[in-house]
Amino acid sequence: MPHLAHITLVVRDYDEALAFYVGKLGFDLVEDSYQPEQDKRWVTIRPPGAVPHATTILLARATTPEQTCRIGDQTGGRVAFFLATDDFDRDHAGFTAAGVTWVRPPADQPYGQVAVFADLYGNLWDLIQYTDRR
């Protein structure tokens, strides 16, 4: 059965992206290997506690002007990623302490508790604890 293996996030620099996603958000580094034939790195991350074969985020360094102009605006200003948590207060406090920029404060919605933050490039993320375990 097909499944979603990776999603791509265009970044300016691998190491600054890792400093944010692994250093500030606590994501797990799954792989970071150099691909000499293409002079690039294969860098994948996933949220902490994800199952071993869960979808990963491929951090793809922009190499063309077209790719560079997409950094931070891959979805035209809409929320791009939805980071589900089992403890909203814990993760909101941890991200705040790590210096994450909140775009919208925590709010109770019919589907759960949610706040929106911007990553280091300006991509928008929901931190969300669903009420019905979607």
Image (tube, helix red, strand yellow):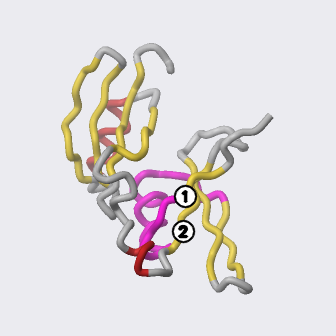
Q: Is residue 23 above or below residue 85?
A: below
Q: How would you rate the neighbour count of disc 2 (Cα within 10 Å): few for under 14, some for 14-19, many for 20 or more?
A: many
Q: Is residue 109 above or below residue 94?
A: above
Amino acid bearing label 1: Thr
Residue topped by disc 2: 60
Q: Secondary structure at mark 1?
A: strand
Q: Do residues under tags 1 and 2 come within 8 Å of each other at their CB atoms?
A: yes
Q: Residue at x 47, y 51 (%)?
A: 26
The part of the image, by quadrant, that contains residue 44 is bottom right
Q: Which residues are magenta?
A: 8-30
Residue topped by disc 1: 8
16 magenta-colored: yes
Q: Residue at x 40, y 75 (%)?
A: 68
Q: Is residue 24 above or below residue 125?
A: below
Q: Nearer the viewer, residue 1 or 109?
A: 1
Locate residue 102 relative to residue 50 in the image: left or right.
left
Q: How would you rate the neighbour count of disc 1 (Cα within 10 Å): few for under 14, some for 14-19, many for 20 or more?
A: few
